Amino acid sequence: MIRSSRSLLLAIAFLLSACGNKELTTYEEQGYVFGTLVEVSVYGEEDAKARQAVNVVMREFQRLHDLLHAWKPSELSSLNAAIAKGESREMQPEVVAMLKDAGQLSAQGDGLFNPAIGGLIKLWGFQADEFKSALPDEKSIAALVAAKPQMSDLALSPSPAPASGRGELVGSRNKAVLLDLGGYAKGYALDRAAELLKQQGVHNALINIGGNVLAMGQHGDRAWRIGIQHPRKPGPIATLELHDGEAIGTSGDYQRFFEYGGKRYCHLIDPRSGYPAQGVQAVTILTHGARAGTLSDAGSKPLFISGSAGWREMARRMNLNEALLIDGEGVVHLTAAMQKRLEFTEPATIRKVEP
């Protein structure tokens, strides 16, 4: 059995019907980019203004998709080709800044968020629009794990021709590095979308990129209300109000996965073993501040890979006070701060609050 984001509902479902007159006051537009469904909702603006603003955002999403594609021709894939040859490449300043930021987030998460393991993601068949139900060769997995590709392997040096408009030279001391920013790009795009909407005078909006959601302002006289997708059932497992400048990010084993021999293999690879993380159905985190979108994307991965035994300590390490993890048995482990924000759709849901 194979599942991809094409065949699934969004991880986060909008609950706008409970927040006022949608038909008269909310403009919505959907698209498909970053391998997932995206949706932008603007509240309280005339349709013409909202449409123009959202079109700017959609064009930005496509630009970032084309810039950062890991296996089709792009700025990032050209860098990967250079690294494989032991060469450096002069990169755009924006991409250099992303790589530096992703490297810092990787270090903060003890390397469990690791955009350098594109080789493992490719080996498992997840660098594709559709996946095959097949296991990689064990020796190939072991070889990539032994090579230990990591973001700290990247080597940056000044450009020999700064007037060219390019950024720094980027290479790697480790040829096994294959960059895949799939766990970073959606969050970065959320922050860019919010910035662009503000520049166009839009102050109340909800931006959803495949389950990573960022709120601007509010929906009428109340906060935006959203649902956290149940990892095994249709509909949300819980709902919450998302306030101005807040974002949530969910990593789940139900979004991109295949089943083989009765076992589920998802796209979230543990760099330590080279195998997809097991024993966790989903992780959701709530983030705040200027980089809420970026953090909502990159921050959920280390918690997911840490599993039910280590997620809480990892949340502390990453300064994530509002987080939850749904383990393999469907038990919801969550912080006290997160419990205060949630309204569970089924009161009988088994919950464990972990200080």
Image: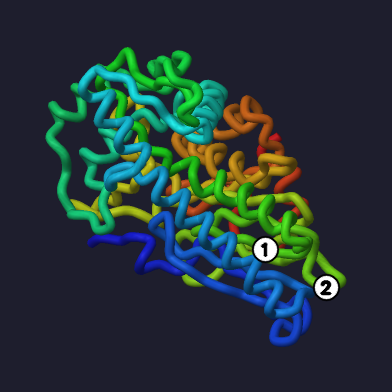
Find the residue positioned furthest to the right. Answer: 221
Left or right: 67 with respect to 309?
Answer: left
Residue 124 in sight = yes
In the image, residue 92 sits, relative to residue 49, either above or below, namely: above
Residue named by callout 1? 206
Find the residue positioned furthest to the front. Answer: 163
Q: Name the residue: 76% across, 74% down.
A: 45
Residue named by callout 2? 220
**Residue 277 point in image, percent of width and height:** 37, 39
**Residue 84 point in image, percent of width and height:** 23, 25
User: Looking at the figure, which quarter contains the N terminus?
Assistant: bottom left
Q: Name the residue: 66% across, 50% down.
A: 247
- Given the image, on which type of amino acid does mark 2 rest? Gly
Residue 306 in sight = no
Quarter of the figure with residue 196: bottom right
Label 1 crowd bin: few (<14), some (14–19), many (20+), radius 10 Å: many
User: Looking at the figure, which quarter contains the C terminus?
Assistant: top right
Mark 1 or mark 2: whose residue is earlier in sequence: 1
Query: As rendered, which of 49 and 80 lies closer to the eye?
Result: 49
